[in-house]
Amino acid sequence: MKILVTGGAGFIGSHTVVELHNAGFEPVIIDNFNNSKITALDGLRAIIGHDVRCYQADCNDVAALEGIFKTENIEGVIHFAAHKAVGESVAQPLSYYYNNLNSTVLLLELMEKYGIENFVFSSSCTVYGEPDALPVTEATPRKAATSPYGNTKQICEDIIRDHVRATPSLKAIALRYFNPIGAHQSAQIGELPLGVPSNLVPFITQTAAGWREKLTIFGNDYNTPDGTNVRDYIHVVDLAKAHVQALRLLQKQTTGQYYDVFNVGTGRGNTVLEVVKAFEKVSGQPLNYEIGARRSGDVEQIFASADKVNNIMEWTAQKTLEESLADAWRWQLTLKK
Ligand code: UFG
């Protein structure tokens, strides 16, 4: 079964391509390499043993997209490709609304035109905002988004839900990712942040590698066990496997008009300081860090209830925080500045 993977050269996309291949699916990538590098395809070839078909094009390029649907016998779409930087979305909202919403609408239109029934969407725990109770379940009401980026994820979820209601054959799942970290254990693929990383783990590994002078921890006066923010850090390979399970769940549906959302997290929360300490342990070296001011827009704490994804999708995160950080570090050591 051929699966179109938009953003398949990116961090989560590339790991998902590997797991799709391992599970017997045939991934086909579309990526514009805006926030990924063509070298990801070399890593994929090294892991899989052959080239993965890849179209270099933008998901808002309707002619390019339609060309793929005409040429390939696509039976499912996993839609990763999106702008994803919270701060940038505040500065350039139109770019985020145009890119993230338009590509989703175009894909759904073309899927309808070409009779493609299976859709998996990359959503985010950002749709919950600052939750009133923890862990967050899928029944936890979504709060008003705190950034245009978060708003695009909420709106895309709504677009998909409404379109599924109106489309008898369509089956769709939105996966609400918590914080993906780590890299493939082969160290052939991993996260490739452009410029200064805004995410915690790449900043930690780049600091340990001497690329950055020190990590600034954004606040230690939160109402958490050690005062630093709590997040649910999930190994990217575990997250990738959840997409395979999502496709299998879609395949099991005998009728269309199926839409559901799943949290994809470990179900445990860790503070920033716990991540730093775990990294020091697995890398065997102290990390240079300081405590700084809070980062605006950060929620105090969030972690998933993984009950629904465990039970219905038959998926559970396997890797520990230490394993995830060890893989992230091994990947960092392969990179040249
Ligand atoms: N952090 C630091 N120093 C840094 C970077 C991050 O202390 O240099 C802290 C943050 O304050 C936060 C934690 O590390 O407490 C994790 O931060 P990340 O930026 O790695 O991840 P976020 O939880 O902020 O963001 C992630 C995704 C977003 C998504 C958001 C939803 O990257 O795409 O979750 O909550 F919108």
Image (cartoon, rainbow, N blue to C red):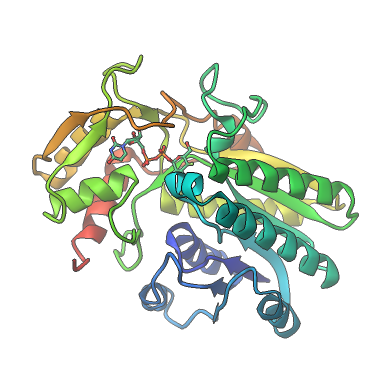
Residue 126 percent coordinates (x, y) = 53, 37
Could you tell me which residue is drawn at 34 percent across and 40 percent down? 320
User: How many labels were placed on the picture?
Assistant: 0
Residue 183 or residue 148, whichever sits in front: 148
Q: Quadrant of the C terminus?
A: bottom left
Q: Quadrant of residue 37?
A: bottom left
Q: Quadrant of the N terminus?
A: bottom right
Residue 315 percent coordinates (x, y) = 56, 43
109 above or below 148?
A: below
280 above or below 168?
A: above
Q: Quadrant of residue 215?
A: top left
Could you tell me which residue is drawn at 56 percent across and 58 percent down? 80
Residue 81 percent coordinates (x, y) = 56, 61
Q: With 69 as the anchor, is 334 left or right in this view?
A: left
Could you tell me which residue is drawn at 40 percent across and 77 percent down? 38
Q: With 257 as the anchor, is 36 left or right in this view?
A: left
Can you name the residue that lies furthest to the bottom here? 71
Q: With 325 as the anchor, is 173 left or right in this view?
A: right
90 above or below 74?
A: above
Where's ligand 1: which quadrant? top left
Can you name the residue that lies furthest to the left here? 285
Residue 57 percent coordinates (x, y) = 57, 77
